[in-house]
Image: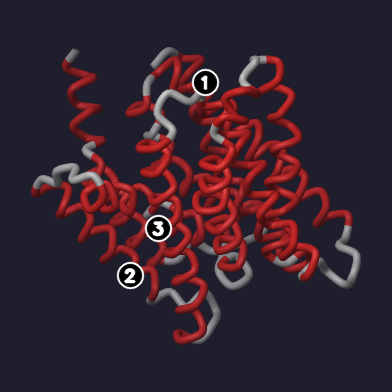
Amino acid sequence: MKPLQIVELLVLAALWGGSFLFMRVAVPEFGPIALILLRTGIAALFLLPLVVFSRLWSQMADHAGKLLLVGVIGTAIPFCLLSYATLYVSAGYASILNATATIFAALIAWVWVGESLGRAAIAGLLLGFVGVAVLAFDDQGNSASYLLLPVGAGLLATFCYGLGANYTRQKLVGLHPLAIAAGSQLGASISLLPLAWMYWPTLPPSARAWQAATLLAVACTAVALVIYFHLIAKSGVNKTMTVTYLIPFFGVLWGMIFLHEPLTWPMLAGGSMILLGVGLSTGLFNHLRAGKMR
């Protein structure tokens, strides 16, 4: 990577790590569903002019049904589940749990399309889930049984991320990434409208909650997606996916700085296992080593 692309990668990780901070701030006042409607709706409004300017509207229209499905499976459901989880766990904890998405993506690819899993990948899957078990011992100030629901919600969210990623790879081949990003955000917001109307907060959210929701939508979703796809175009998928290792760092860092959240030993140990499992299960270490050799 060139220096400018390394800076972009760090900015992307900082933005995506910050999403857990903003969810943690805004979700108690908005609730998970209303917050995610704002997140996806504002992000769609930000991205759609770029789609029109890039003359990609016809691509979105031709694949509207598939983009709606991706928006539901890969955006609306996991965003809502992770927002629910941040009601009970710290921003840093949620960002570590989020890293299991790539493990689920590898597992689903093995089951769905028969992608091979070597010994290292299988070891990575097992290590990642051991890391989740270690995380579960960190009660985050709640009773152990009470924490099972938010942890389960977080894992279901990352499973949906993996499912959505594999569906996109199989069904939306050749579609421009910007069209996928805008279409999925628009599809997610449309699917959430009825539920958000039912569960809209009865008390007006504070200015702080609105600021967090707006930053979550614009900076951590729309702008982050633009940077993400630009990096893929310039540096390739494998190098860009190293962002997976940086997101928990920033998630924990922002939580410690702005919300005074502690970094616990289960978070440190479990997070290390999960990230190592991600590297093994996706073959990322092999790609990086091959890149250095070239």
**Disc assigned to residue 134:** 2
Element at badge 1?
Answer: helix
Q: Name the residue under label 1.
A: 230
Which one is closest to the eye, mark 1 or mark 2? 1
Left/right placement of residue 216 relative to residue 269 reads right
The answer for how far apart the CA atoms under marks 1 and 3 are is 25 Å
Q: Which of marks 1 and 3 is nearer the N terminus?
A: 3
Quadrant placement of the N terminus: top left
Quadrant placement of the C terminus: top left
Disc 3: CA contacts within 10 A as few (<14), some (14-19) or many (>=20)? many
Which residue: 26% across, 43% down?
Answer: 279
In the image, what residue type sits under mark 1? His
**Where is residue 139 drawn, in percent x and y?**
47, 78
Q: Earlier in the sequence, mark 3 or mark 2?
A: 2
Q: Mark 3 points at which residue?
A: 159
**Where is residue 8 drawn, in percent x and y?**
53, 24
Element at badge 2?
Answer: helix
Which residue: 38% across, 59% down?
Answer: 268
Determine which quarter of the picture holds residue 234: top left
Does any portion of residue 158 appear in the rendered image?
yes
In the image, what residue type sits under mark 3? Phe
Which residue: 65% across, 15% down?
Answer: 55
In the image, what residue type sits under mark 2? Val
Disc 2: CA contacts within 10 A as few (<14), some (14-19) or many (>=20)? some
